[in-house]
Image (spheres, rainbow, N blue to C red):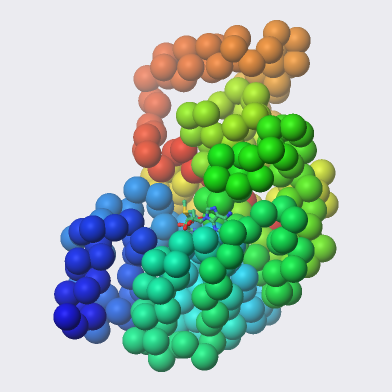
Amino acid sequence: MDLRDEIIEGFKKSNEYRRLPKRVERQLNLKTNQYKNDDFGIEIRYNLIKNKLLNSGIKSVVDLGGKSGFFSIQMLDENIISRACVYDVSSNALKFGNKIAKYLGLENEINFIEKKLSIDNINNIPNADVVLCLNLIHHAGVFFDIDLVGERGWAEYAVDFLKILRKKYRIAAVSVGFKGKKPVNWLIPNRLRPVYFNKIANKAGWKVVYDANVGDLSLFGEKIACGRRTKKTPYILSLEIIYRFMGYNIVNKISKTIEKLNPKKIDNEKLSKYHIFILK
Ligand SMILES: C[S@@+](CC[C@H](N)C(=O)[O-])C[C@H]1O[C@@H](n2cnc3c(N)ncnc32)[C@H](O)[C@@H]1O
């Protein structure tokens, strides 16, 4: 089976490779969009990260939970970086990424490493200019570090996780799913979650230089989406006060009711579950 057929089979059967780098799409005359919806906003997040990292003098990236390494491969292929290291627990995803990197002649610039990451071993990951931690940390407490998140709660856990990254990396791109019951053991009302994640990042020693909801990014673009859900508006400040004095359920109820009443409400339901933060 040639690579094109193999990729099409892979798209149909598994979830291991969700986007193809642009050059692969061109050379194999194969559009990812024909086979996969970008339900996780991979391209939107990629473009944001690229725009925020351009001209910041970066050379190397470590990608935690990087699946098949789309972000790293595409950045290498656009000469934004010259070195990348992708960690994931899924050997199939990594194998696929390796194949794509070889096809593009990038195999000497990227390593794919199979490892189950946890707060106990991220300190041993190599240093780099940038760490990508994209759609990984909201799985803590379910797929990894289950006991720790159970005992300490997700907020304290996430502060410690980000503190370790702070010591090793100059810049971090972190995307987080605030959806359903995830992150577990973090009783923060839905509407306030991005705001409280900013507090977590600050406590860990990071400065949040950009943040946006991924749904907002797709609808409004980078400028308008920036801080749209984390700005200290009177609405957000009131929700924070109500949360402090009256608790989680009441804030969830109030915010849902108010947002339903808003006739101008525009939302991209799937993508709006994800938020991206650029930390320095
Ligand atoms: C939701 S996907 C995100 C993929 C990519 N980073 C993105 O944002 O599109 C989460 C990835 O993390 C990996 N993963 C989950 N737990 C992990 C762990 N403890 N160590 C390493 N990888 C893990 C999964 O195999 C999966 O590839």
On-image quarter of the C terminus? bottom right
Q: Is residue 26 left or right of residue 81?
A: left
96, 224: nearer the viewer: 96
Q: Is residue 89 left or right of residue 219?
A: right
Residue 4, image quadrant = bottom left
Residue at image position (37%, 20%) is 263
Residue 269, image quadrant = top left
Residue at image position (33%, 75%) is 22
Residue 209, image quadrant = bottom right
On-image quarter of the N terminus? bottom left
149, 83: nearer the viewer: 149
| 108 w.r.t. 162: above or below | below
Instruction: Tell me residue 109's x, y (percent).
Output: 54, 87
174, 15: nearer the viewer: 15
| 7 w.r.t. 104: above or below | above
Instruction: Tell me residue 81's x, y (percent).
Output: 57, 81
| 237 w.r.t. 38: above or below | above
Residue at image position (56%, 26%) is 190
Residue at image position (40%, 74%) is 95
Q: Is residue 96 left or right of residue 49?
A: left
Q: Can residue 55 be seen from the camera position used here?
A: no
Instruction: Tell me residue 144's x, y (percent).
Output: 60, 47
Q: Is residue 235 left or right of residue 45?
A: right
Instruction: Tell me residue 19's x, y (percent).
Output: 34, 64
